[in-house]
Amino acid sequence: MTSLEAARARDAADPLRHYRDRFFLPLGTIYLDGNSLGVLPKATVERQRKVVAEEWGSELIRSWNSRGWIDAPARIGAKIARLIGAQPHEVIVADSVSVNLFKLIVAAAALSPDRPQILSEGGNFHTDLHIASGAAELAGKRLDVVERAAVRDALSGETNLLLLTHVHFKAGYRFDIKEVTARAKAAGAVTLWDLSHSAGAVPLHLNRDGAELAVGCGYKYLNGGPGAPAFLYVAEHLQERLIPPLRGWMGHAAPFDFTDYYVPAPGIARFLVGTPPILSLSALESGVESFDGVDMDALWVKSVQLFDLFAALASERCPELQCISPAEPEQRGSHISFRHPHAFEICQALIDAGVIGDFRAPDVIRFGLTPLYLGFEDIWQAVDRMADILDSRRWREPRFAVRGKVT
C-alpha cells in the first residue's frame, strides 16, 4: 500500500504541481467535487473587481466596445476550442447546457425531415433526456431511449440524431467519440455529444475524431463559477446548414440594424440568443485561462495516476465499497465512483470530516479527480478519513441520515 510519505514524494515530483497555486483551496478541506463545481481561480477575484469597478463602473456602456464585451462569447469559445480539439471559430459560449442542447437538437433534426428517431442512452444525465423529449416533440420526432450496450445496434435508417454524453455522470464510463460518430454517420445520422464531464479533464480531439455537434459545461472542470455559461460546438461544414430555433438578436447577421426579420449570422455566431452576461462570462474566462500553459495529455496522465492510487487505496482500506468505474483509462472519465447501500450517510460523514465528494442516487459516492489542483497526498488523506469512517461506523450517526437538498 502506498504510504503517506510516498504520496508526498509524488507531489514533489509532479510536473503539474505548480498549477495548484492558481486556485483558492480552503485549508483543512480535501475537495473532490470539481466535476460538479470547480474551485475558485485566484485570477477570477481580481478580474471580477476590474469588470465591476472599472469596466462597468467607469466606462459603463462604452465597455461593450472598448473592453471587448461584445466579443466575449467568441473569444472565450476560441480558448475552450484549444482544450477540446476544435478550431477557434467552431466554439461559442452561450446560455446553459440545457438550452444549447435544445438549440442543436431542433436545428439538427431539420436536416433529415424524413427520419423520425432521436436516439439516446437510458440512464443519461436526466436534463439531457428531459430536453430531448421536449425538443423531439416540437420537431415532430420521437425519442427512443435504449440501454448503453444497445445504442450501436439501435442506429438505423430512421435515426435522425444520436444524443450521447461522452463521460457518464455517475460511473464515469466513456464512449469512443471517433468510433461512435463514424458508426452514426454510416447510418446517415448526426451525433450530438454532451462534454460536461469531459472538457478540461479528458483528452478531446473533436476535429480529428469527426465530431459534428457538442455542448459542454462551464462550471465543472473549467472552473467558471456557479452556473457559469456553457459552450457549444458546431463543425465548420455544418454551420451554414443549421438554423437555430431560438432566434435572438445576438444571433442575427446584423443585430444593430434592428430589422423585423431574422437573418442568421454567419457561422457559429448564429447560436447566440440574448445579450451576453458579462460578469459570468468574465469569471468563465478566468477559469479557462487557468489552463494556460497546461499540456492536456500530461493532465490526463495525472488523472490516470490519481484514479489508480484512489482505487488501490480504497480496495485495500475500504473493501466494503464497490468501485463501479472502469479500470481501463480509455474507457472512463476523470472521476471515480463507488457503490454502497449507505452511500448517502457515508458521503455526509466524509463532508463532516473535510472530504467533499458527492452522492448520486440511489447508492453511489462519486469523487472528482481534478489534476490541475488535486495532489496525491489529497487522495491518500481522503481514503484514510473514509477508512476511519467505515471502520468506526461513524456514518451511522443519525445526523448523517438527514436528507435536505442534494447537491
Image (tube, rainbow, N blue to C red):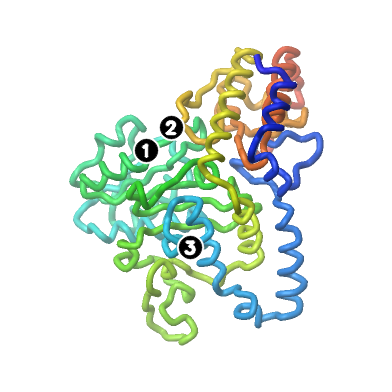
Whichever of callouts 1 and 3 sits on the residue coming sooner in the sequence is 3
Q: Are marks 3 and 2 in contact (CB under 8 Å)?
A: no
x, y percent for residue 144: 31, 42
Q: Are marks 2 and 1 in contact (CB under 8 Å)?
A: yes
x, y percent for residue 154: 25, 37
Give the CA separation, mark 2 to mark 1.
Answer: 8 Å
Q: Which residue is mark 3?
A: 92
Q: Nearer the viewer, residue 144 or 292?
A: 292
Q: Amino acid at mark 2?
A: Glu
Residue shown at the point (75%, 61%) measured from the top left: 46
Please identify the quarter of the rendering in which residue 337 is found.
Answer: top right
Q: Secondary structure at mark 3?
A: strand
Question: Is residue 263 shown above or below 214?
Answer: below
- The circle drawn on residue 330 is 2
Left or right relative to 105: residue 12: right
Q: Amino acid at mark 3?
A: Ile
Give the CA separation, mark 3 to mark 2.
Answer: 28 Å
Residue shown at the point (67%, 41%) measured from the top left: 373
Please identify the quarter of the rendering in which residue 187 is found.
Answer: top left
Whichever of callouts 3 and 2 sits on the residue coming sooner in the sequence is 3
Question: Is residue 231 shown above or below 199?
Answer: below
Q: Which residue is mark 1?
A: 176
x, y percent for residue 209: 35, 46
